[in-house]
Amino acid sequence: MSAASSRPIVVFGDDWGRHVSSMQHVFRPILARRRVVWVNAIGHRVPALTPTDARRGIQKARAMLQPRSRAAASPWDPGRPHALIQPRVLPWHHLAAVHAFNTWSLVRAIRRTLAAHGWTEPPVLVTGSPPSVGVVGRLGECAAVYFCMDDFLHLPGVSAWMLEPLERRLLECVDAVVATAESLTRSKAPRNGRAHYLPQGVNDEHFATPQPEPADLAAIPRPRIGFAGGVSACCDFGMIRRIAQTYPSASVVLVGPVTAPLDGMDLPNIHVLGPRPYGVLPAYVQAFDVGLIPYVLNDWTMAVDPLKLLEYLAAGLPVVTTAIPEVLKYGDAVHVAEDLEGFVRLVGAALGEDRAASRERGRAVARRNAWTARADQLLAILDDVADRRGAPSPLVAA
């Protein structure tokens, strides 16, 4: 085993398996090649006094009360990380005492997990979570990398005021940044080392393999102009309403969790289906006739590389999108609209496309951007960063 392949990778990500995220997508192919310790979400916002936050807090508390050994030394399952840690932390990361406790708890749990598996090599630390900054330099790691998938300063639903100083500290001490948007490689450049661009990928076979049409979708008339993703503040609901009004004989279908008010979505040809499991999502996408990315243009979306674009292409759909920067690299395969009128017009053009031609073009793009290729690129970056750095960090007492 080479020095690089023997290095464990410690990852601060989201809750494994709760939602299928980009970070989980890119690490799944890595599990067969490297030993991965996955640390579940440590929180990016201060809880509010709401029923939703109360339920989530109870879920987290129950998970934290499970015996640590179950998470630290579970047998390897190819569908999950080699070791999975449910962190025992508090969400008020801006408080010095809480941050110190969280750092102590995380370092202790990770060291115990590495020891339980007999992994003595200096690990590579990959974090997508600014509150983990206290851990950097305390694991004896051979490299620390910030995996930046969003601009937390503009991301809805997080406590940006809390994350901003933590992220600033993180950028001062990591050896490199890996970012999913070109703009993030500039705005999140580390003090030392490089910022690497790693766009979103796709499980191309998952979305290209034909699936039966879902019964609830079969009842909705064609043509279907569809959106599959978070029905959130990133969506231009006025644009969606305009599409439904302009094409009254078509059905506008929204599939995904709803986290924003559905103002104006009460037209008879707009169908809001809500979330569907990732395993059956391709069946819904394949049954669309056009895939939409009707994003508003703001500080948040200007740094978003929409995962759904490649999923639409893998399913063989013509795609119409607003002109957020990260879609422009696929300009030869998608319809990019500069304004509302252009978006409406391009939806009509997409409805009239030769589906066989668009299907082949889209699937070719998706194959070139599979998550397996992204995983290869990420491993090459991590190995290069670790090799360039040389000596690991001195082990700091927890």
Image: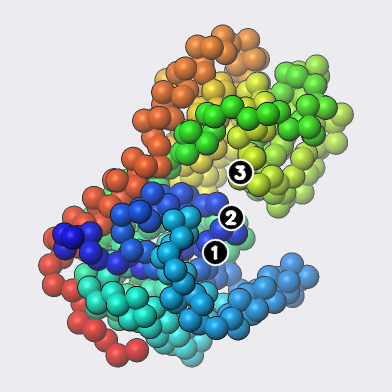
The correct choice, above or below, for 318 with respect to 136 in the image is above
User: Disc 3 marks which residue?
Assistant: 279
Q: Can I make out residue 99 in this image?
A: no
The correct choice, above or below, for 386 with respect to 261 in the image is below
Circle 3 or circle 2, nearest the eye: 3
User: Disc 1 marks which residue?
Assistant: 15
Labelled pair 2, 1 in contact (Cβ < 8 Å): yes
For the point 33% across and 81% down, which residue is it? Answer: 115
Please identify the quadrant where the C terminus is shown.
bottom left
In 3D space, how far apart are the residues under numbered discs 3 and 1 (Cα atoms)? 18 Å
User: Disc 2 marks which residue?
Assistant: 19
Please identify the quadrant where the N terminus is shown.
bottom left
Callout 2 environment at 10 Å: few (<14), some (14 to 19), or many (20+)? few
Q: Position of residue 13 (x, y in %)?
A: 46, 63
Which residue extends farthest front? 75
Labelled pair 3, 1 in contact (Cβ < 8 Å): no
Q: Secondary structure at mark 1?
A: loop
Q: Quadrant of residue 76?
A: bottom left
Q: Secondary structure at mark 3?
A: loop
For the point 80% across and 16% down, which residue is it? Answer: 249
